[in-house]
Image (spheres, rainbow, N blue to C red):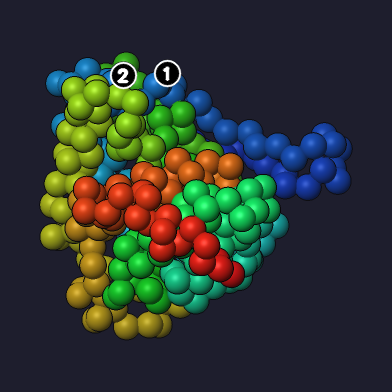
Amino acid sequence: MRIIQQNTTILIPRIFDFEISADQSFGYPYMFMEHRGHSLPNNLAITIPSEHHPKVAKQLASVFAELQNLTFSRIGRLWCGEHADQPVEVIAMEWHATPGPLDTSLEYFYSQKQAENREAMALHPDDPDWLTACWVLKTGLTHMVVEDRVRDPFPLCHLDLHYGNMLFDKEYNLTGIVDWSSAQAAPLEQLSVSPEFATFPALSDEENQPRINLKNLVVESIKEIERVQERRPPLDNPDVGITLQSNLTPLSFYMASKSAEITYRQYMSSPRGSIFAGKMVAKLIYEESVTWEQLKEVYGAMPLF
């Protein structure tokens, strides 16, 4: 959190004291921080009155834009020493199938998805529907990854940026972002993921529209910030030149693309939900041109590993 406070204007609660070890007098890890407002009870688009959406969108866009510009040379967790007073370094991830640190977005997405596919197929061996779903999710990676973003710089990603971790006052001013426990350097594609902008198949078009509208407002606001934002070198490698960064695909462009929705469906899927996620991703990729049965004819008996 100190990295964010020192390098961005993102509002986060001030930390008065913390301990990450249980080996101290209190006996448990703890964090003592200031109160900055309240989280909302549900999705932003449906909880916040529509007349406040433009203001909220600009505030969210500022968070995304600053995270996009706070970058690192590799993919992984950030470590500044036990007391957060050392130079930042990128270290291995705790949750990922290939802890790293990693050098490319391809490694990040591919190794994690294949690990999840192995778990799914262990539960449903030789099932053609499950095998097809896993193949769709595997090949879907080619529709997610941005070629000019395969290597660094990698932005800081919150990894859990939803309404429960956003604090607002009574006038819907964003007063803080909390729970940075999973934050790490990750691909730009990962930064685009937020449940706040997701649509749901079970909802009608009318019910999904507020989410779409809010996302569009956020994307346009990010685009405005990107036009004037000065690029910065990776925080862990400040001597690197930034000339080539001006030509990289920006977050606003990616968030507005179908690829971002595929990335969301991939990231939010679990091994036990592979069938549902696979059919969702297949629909996004092929629309009405290819049926599930046709995909099953191709992938239903093809070795996955």
Foreground of the two, 149 or 175 = 149
Q: Position of residue 92 (x, y in %)?
A: 63, 66
Label of residue 163 in the image: none
Q: Secondary structure at mark 1?
A: loop
Within 10 Å of disc 1 (Cα), the crowding (few <14, some 14-19, many 20+) is few
Q: Secondary structure at mark 2?
A: helix
9 versus 167 height, above or below = below
Q: Read off the residue under disc 1.
A: 41
Foreground of the two, 45 or 114 = 114
**Residue type at the position of mark 1:** Pro
Instruction: Say if residue 198 shows up in the picture.
Output: yes
113 versus 35 height, above or below = below
Residue at mark 2 to residue at mark 1: CA–CA distance? 7 Å
Within 10 Å of disc 2 (Cα), the crowding (few <14, some 14-19, many 20+) is few
Q: Cβ–Cβ below 8 Å for labels 2 and 1?
A: yes
Foreground of the two, 64 or 299 = 299
